Image (spheres, rainbow, N blue to C red):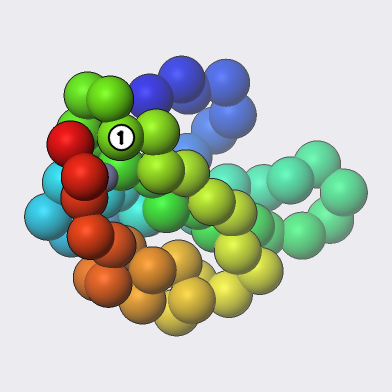
Amino acid sequence: MTVHRRFRDRIRIGPVQVATYYDGRGRDMHTAACTAPGCGFSTDYRDRAAAELAARTHHCKA
Ligand SMILES: [Zn+2]
């Protein structure tokens, strides 16, 4: 996972990491990113709950 922003409140749900970051335009954004090699799942969300839900329901193909 490429960390080019400042992530905080990082948690791990299975292989997926959920983190909150400041998007530089006055908003907090939330990202769910799978850490499994070869998966590549990574999505940003406006809502923390949405990111955590995506992490929980992620079906890893790796
Ligand atoms: Zn995955």
**Is residue 17 visible to us here?**
yes
**Front-lying residue, 46 or 39:** 39
**Relative to 33, does residue 13 appear above or below in the rendering?**
below
**Relative to 11, does residue 57 appear above or below in the rendering?**
below
Question: Where does the image place residue 44, in percent across and percent down from the top left?
Answer: 59, 54
Report the residue at 41% width, 43% height from top: 41
Q: Is residue 8 left or right of residue 59?
A: right
**Relative to 13, does residue 1 appear above or below in the rendering?**
above
Quarter placement of the C terminus? top left
Q: Which residue is mark 1?
A: 39
Please, what is the three-letter code of the amino acid marked with disc 1?
Answer: Cys
Report the residue at 58% width, 74% height from top: 47
Quarter placement of the N terminus? top left
Question: Where does the image place residue 21, in percent across and percent down from the top left?
Answer: 58, 47
- Quadrant of the rendered image holding ligand 1: top left
Question: Mark 1 CB in 8 Å range of ligand 1?
Answer: yes
- The number of numbered badges drawn on the structure is 1
Report the residue at 21% width, 45% height from top: 61
**Front-lying residue, 42 or 52:** 42
Q: Is residue 43 left or right of residue 11?
A: right
SS at circle 1: loop
Question: Where does the image place residue 52, in percent across and percent down from the top left?
Answer: 36, 70
Question: Where does the image place residue 43, in percent across and percent down from the top left?
Answer: 54, 51
Report the residue at 80% width, 41% height from top: 24
**Front-lying residue, 33 or 23:** 33
